[in-house]
Image (cartoon, coloured by chain):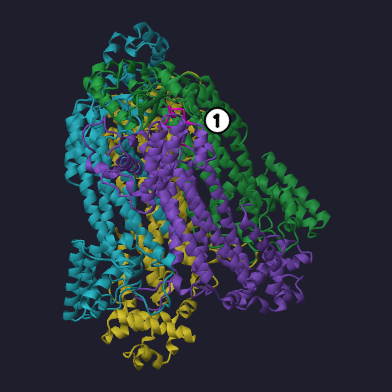
Chain colours: A purple, B green, C cyan, D yellow
Amino acid sequence: MKLWSGRLSGSMDATFALLNNSLPFDKRLAQVDVRGSIAWAHALAQAGVLKPAEANKIVAGLQAILQEFEHAQFVFQEGDEDIHTAVERRLTELIGPEGGMLHTGRSRNDQVATDFCLWVREAVDRLEQRLAGLQSALLERAEQDMGIILPGYTHFQQAQPILFSHWWLSHFWELQRDRQRLQNVRQQVSEMPLGSGALAGTSFPIDRFALAEELGFSRPCSNSLDGVGNRDFAAELLFWAALAGVHLSKLAEALILYSTNEFGFITLADEFSTGSSLMPQKKNPDPLELVRAKSSVLIGRLTGLLSTLKALPSAYDKDLQEDKPPVFEAVDTMELLLPVMSGLLMTLTVNSVRTRAAVNWQVLATDLADYLVQHGVPFRQAHSATGQAVRRAAELAVSLPDLPLADWQAIHPMFAEDLFEVFNIERSLEKRSAWGGTAPQAVKEQLELARKALGQIL
Amino acid sequence: MKLWSGRLSGSMDATFALLNNSLPFDKRLAQVDVRGSIAWAHALAQAGVLKPAEANKIVAGLQAILQEFEHAQFVFQEGDEDIHTAVERRLTELIGPEGGMLHTGRSRNDQVATDFCLWVREAVDRLEQRLAGLQSALLERAEQDMGIILPGYTHFQQAQPILFSHWWLSHFWELQRDRQRLQNVRQQVSEMPLGSGALAGTSFPIDRFALAEELGFSRPCSNSLDGVGNRDFAAELLFWAALAGVHLSKLAEALILYSTNEFGFITLADEFSTGSSLMPQKKNPDPLELVRAKSSVLIGRLTGLLSTLKALPSAYDKDLQEDKPPVFEAVDTMELLLPVMSGLLMTLTVNSVRTRAAVNWQVLATDLADYLVQHGVPFRQAHSATGQAVRRAAELAVSLPDLPLADWQAIHPMFAEDLFEVFNIERSLEKRSAWGGTAPQAVKEQLELARKALGQIL
Amino acid sequence: MKLWSGRLSGSMDATFALLNNSLPFDKRLAQVDVRGSIAWAHALAQAGVLKPAEANKIVAGLQAILQEFEHAQFVFQEGDEDIHTAVERRLTELIGPEGGMLHTGRSRNDQVATDFCLWVREAVDRLEQRLAGLQSALLERAEQDMGIILPGYTHFQQAQPILFSHWWLSHFWELQRDRQRLQNVRQQVSEMPLGSGALAGTSFPIDRFALAEELGFSRPCSNSLDGVGNRDFAAELLFWAALAGVHLSKLAEALILYSTNEFGFITLADEFSTGSSLMPQKKNPDPLELVRAKSSVLIGRLTGLLSTLKALPSAYDKDLQEDKPPVFEAVDTMELLLPVMSGLLMTLTVNSVRTRAAVNWQVLATDLADYLVQHGVPFRQAHSATGQAVRRAAELAVSLPDLPLADWQAIHPMFAEDLFEVFNIERSLEKRSAWGGTAPQAVKEQLELARKALGQIL
Amino acid sequence: MKLWSGRLSGSMDATFALLNNSLPFDKRLAQVDVRGSIAWAHALAQAGVLKPAEANKIVAGLQAILQEFEHAQFVFQEGDEDIHTAVERRLTELIGPEGGMLHTGRSRNDQVATDFCLWVREAVDRLEQRLAGLQSALLERAEQDMGIILPGYTHFQQAQPILFSHWWLSHFWELQRDRQRLQNVRQQVSEMPLGSGALAGTSFPIDRFALAEELGFSRPCSNSLDGVGNRDFAAELLFWAALAGVHLSKLAEALILYSTNEFGFITLADEFSTGSSLMPQKKNPDPLELVRAKSSVLIGRLTGLLSTLKALPSAYDKDLQEDKPPVFEAVDTMELLLPVMSGLLMTLTVNSVRTRAAVNWQVLATDLADYLVQHGVPFRQAHSATGQAVRRAAELAVSLPDLPLADWQAIHPMFAEDLFEVFNIERSLEKRSAWGGTAPQAVKEQLELARKALGQIL
């Protein structure tokens, strides 16, 4: 069945029919499509376009179809070219020619845009849950691993010592911004396209405000051309997924390195590891690598949609059919990656002995420069002097604390015996006590704030 | 001058120095960098790290440098590898070794992140102005062209008649969402990175809340690792630019087509057209084509940054240096495209005779189907019958109103003499009077709302 | 069944198992996987690792499995995490523990790389056929439409008259380059990864040259690390698809415009058109819009893979699992788009009356400037004078040939009565007779070359 | 000065003029533009369009301009909107109105396409040199580091021991494919667009074959529409750069990790390192991080151009002006990255003691499984048994060679005393002696082939 039969003769070319067929993916809209149609039938009745009896018959038919979808009993047929066609076909089977009244004053253009908004709204809810779930996991780790010290890195060279909890929390805040962004996506699906018709508005006296309310939208969109053509929400959701994916990939990258034999900071649980078909000793961090790879796939999906939307000239073009596969894929991907990451985090082991042992004394060089600053040396000179000491120690192949005082003093006269007291990692941490720093007390305050932030969008 | 001289021997390889040098682009941060440093000097003084006299001297020196930048008198030198180095070098020239005290407790990592946030905040203000400027141009056109009718298109085939004002307004709402999104970008730069140090926080008792206030931030960031590594705001600005660019490209595409000889709906002003080096008759819509192309460049820039950020393992990596060129380019591009579009819109001529003449009677086919619906025929049958009439007219090579009544009735018995009254474009428009539709009254109400929306972010 | 059972305790986390499972897509490798395994069994036998009887048993088992795949009788089981696991599991079911000998000296890393190369090689063959099919369609149109004149456009403004055949052929050459590029992809899969082991090479004395020959490769790869990690061929295939997609999108865009009511140059066949669910008159060029959109999807897929490959540090990482879905999608897409375009081209109607009528006399302005050049006026002055004449005609609202001689001469004294002989479109065409121009004779020569080029890769 | 002055009244809008101005980037085409013009003057003379004296005067003027460009003495003027305009303006200044004869029968459309091809051809030559330079550096390292053993990784977990030379060579082959691909790019610029006119061919009897020869092209393009619109070569160059960039990023990523404190496999030379403004001890691998980041920028540039080209409808559109900035940037980037990488490789130190010490005995697990295979155990069982031994050793917290024989035999009865002979890394390497493996002899043969391959494109 086609929804347009009078104008064109002959049947569709077979290869084109394959290309045109959106049912393989848009059947995921089945339930929202039917719910949208029920609301539309109500609106037509309210507007006097359908008689009450007609409307009731249609609504009853649609509810039966909804049941079929909910119980996976709906049977698609060969000619169903999209979900809308399938539903109208089934409705007519169930209730007869009055099924053909449902589409009065409506177009697939405003219908599919509405379906898609409804679907995205529900996806946003699910994603938010899972995002919060991963944030909770990070909070739990931050609490559990409080007190564990590891080297902090910049340029992946050891920089300054930090608390593992501080590191876990740094990822919490990335996800917090992702959660805020998800709220922005939700905003983008708060206007209802339905009632925009094909592009020019509906020609029947539909109360679009009431209709919007029934479907849970804040209001009807203000311009019918924009209503049928607007896919900002899809682009925004894909951007959300791409950036959240990037955040997950950063966490994944670090954990992959931390789990190498050379770093040895963490050990993944066996249930989040895989082996090798050839090498019996292997325990591979596959979930983290897949997270990393998927983040790139998501970037490509965003690129693809933006490029699709670019320079599309008018209200609705068939190009827009390519909006759904990337959105569905992005949502599915994130719905899978987020709980995998949560599970992986909650089951990994932090090897606190190895993290502490990895700390090279050089990471206290800034503290040594600060030592000179406290003795009145301008920081830039203090920095240079300390740098020379590091180089001197490297030349002598000794650890920094083993560099003799004489060498220190040869470099800068303000170095004195008490410089060796600087070699105290705990004290170094405690000094970073300004808001947001890695001092234990500051991290506790941060954790407090994070707990609150989890319960609300700041 | 390098800000790190003690640790490494020898000088930098020449090709690497070229690659490493960020001054060609980051000098755009000059003024925000100095302002950030002034605030930092205040904070160091407040924390007792600098004596008042030292702080005053430093601040005076920085203000002199600010003047130099404002009057384009600052002289960069060969060895200045980035803007921060250049400013500290100049400060030391001006005030002596105390210049070396400024960087106490601070790192280029938190410094550049702060500079970049400040720069983006100002860019957002300018962009918002220009976006509102283009929205105003659309509103003016919508008012001015009220009453002009043109064919509305879907699939770039004539669909239903619409008002030109309705079409202009459809682009207004896209930009309104862009303006809302710009607010979201602003949110992303409301937390101050300064005081995060290299990655672990600052080791001096800086009051980061007071510092944030002085620099106009809402609050300091909550985690120092996140503070130096967060580039969400850059990604979000690039996404904003890419999507706003897509919106401009859609408008551009339509106007390019409307200005062809074949459509003839609009004529661009000569000052927004170019000629050909070879073909004397040419008047080309180059600005619109450049808008269209630039939208793709922006998509690529977003892709590039997201891919750069992907899987970066730690707090700060040098990869982040590649964050600024795309953001600067995106802002520059949009700062140029928006006023070009505004100017082009305000100076083009709408050829209302040609737009009206272009309307093919077939665009009333939906109204003919509605005619049958009003006579009790289910819409799906009405649609099919009308489609057959269109096909019959095509076979007879007659215009739809010229198809004899007999043919209509042969197709469906409910067609009667009064069907010909449907061939009234104005009446067709008036029927689309539900909220958001193209009826003149509805468009006036929409215009009213748009005027309000321009003054506020809904 | 897992191929690695000794090292890890416990079972895989359920969400991770979902993420990890590649069977849904890599089962498309089934037949090449089995063929690769048969060759591997031969190689193991030749190397003396398998006894002849063992090898025969294994090969017989594999051939039975190949039959099962060919007849769609192979039954996947719950625990099959990828196609390699499924095949080895089935082999062991069929022939017992000797099935476990097949993987000796081989890894899934070199196995899957080999499978993928084999699959791509076959895909390249199919794509080349379909590409040549579309080129043939373009040649047929070029022959069939010889003599039809239409306006040539630059900036989508009428520029100079051209032959429709010339326009069709311009698209032929784009595809010819695509076909050459496909040869380059084929080159990229001419080296065999098999025998690279997990990363370090196989530890058994396999004759990789003989193995390569059996599997139809030119030679074994020269470095085992590169062998398992190389995905250049996948990137190159995706780039091929993206650029070929861009070429199709350009053709599609033009045909969409040519089929508008306003241009009216072509009419699509009904079997390559769709209608509207609401508007009975609609005949939409959906296949062309889908081609246009798919080209963007392909760009995104390329972006995604390149971003996935970026900064992958070592021989094989699980990220590489994400190489297959985009390649499969790209091949499927092009395998569909190419015949759809061929069919659409062969069934559309060119409306030669409308194309000729659309030619505006202004397109002869270059010829008028050439007229002055032939009378000794430097081209730049001739161009300016003709431009003024065009403007003058526009001011007087007359067609260019109707501009009185006096006006021409007021602009430039070298204009004389015979200038009006320039208004001859056929003559204008004939003048573009240099190689590659639109003169009928030149187009015939070009067609001749194109015919030859179709039979070979130039 | 504009090259089109007659048709349009008024001057260009100032913001549009900024947008339209391509001189800031296309001035890089200066020399190829002049050379193309000299050839065009010759062709016009040969065709009898210019008298010999006119042609000589024009050519002399152009040669003077070429000198000005070569000596950086050419002075651009305010109104020069692109390089072509600037050159024609200067020519007319130098030789008078005959300068206006040069553009006869030519358009900026075919001119700029030709310039761009010429520029790319020269860029390809330079890039090939630098690519070969980096390949040479890899070969030198492979020779120099022969005999150094390090762990080979998959999933960034230790997998099997390899030779450092084998690892260096794996990167050689990636670049070898990049060099082949560069040859394909060169192919793409072997056809000359000049003589295509604006789109329809030139109307003067130009011998395009002679012209092509003079400019070093293989032949003129076969279709004028394609000649002015073809940008495949730009897309292909960007793809080349993106994929070569990916290859560099992979090498960079590994070297970044190898230079961490935790791995410690290599030490970068000071001249390829940077320090920190805050942390005195820092020695950062900035060049490698910038290489990594730039690879993403290049991906974005490719994306941008493909999206720009998508759905461009006709021969030449102004959108094509956006083809040059990404190509220039990509070439500049690669011209910088390649020598930086070469220099960095040649100056780094491999710490052979640490690489050897890093090898964990577990990497011989495959050899242990092979041991069982040699005793007749099917590989899959051998794999499982060895995996259990690895797990057992982990449970006992002993190194694999320290696991008592009794434990081995409890797992599989075929393990015997001589299993401990497997713990010999050199022997393990030697076993990978099949072509392409990591055995010293195989690596030497590979090196031999690589040396040959460097001298030719295979």
Q: Nearer the viewer, residue A339 or D262?
A: A339
Q: Can residue C270 be seen in the rendering of this structure? A: yes
Name the residue rendered at 65%, 51% in the picture.
B191
Q: Position of residue D342 (x, y in %)?
A: 45, 61
Residue at figure coordinates x 36%, y 30% from the top left? B156
Q: Amino acid at mark 1?
A: Leu
Few, some or many residues within 10 Å of mark 1 (<14, 14–19, 20+): many
Residue marked by disc 1? B134
**Quadrant where the N terminus of chain B lies?**
bottom right
Q: Is residue D269 above or below residue C330?
A: below
Q: Quadrant of the C terminus of chain B?
A: top right
Q: Image check: D418 left or right of B239? A: left
- Nearer the observer, D408 or C133: D408
Q: Position of residue B242 (x, y in %)?
A: 49, 42
- Inspect this view and state whether residue B315 appears: no
The part of the chain drawn in magenta is: A193-206
Quarter of image, res D414: bottom left
Q: Main secondary structure of the magenta part?
A: loop
Above or below, C270 against D11 in this view is below
Q: Quadrant of residue C402?
A: top left
Q: Position of residue B321 (x, y in %)?
A: 56, 53
Asked if residue A201 lies in the magenta stretch, the reply is yes
Which chain letter matches label 1?
A: B
Q: Is B328 within the magenta?
A: no
- Answer left or right for D74 relative to C345: right
- In percent of the image, x 34 and y 20: which residue is there? B361
Residue C330's place in the image compared with C226, above or below, is above
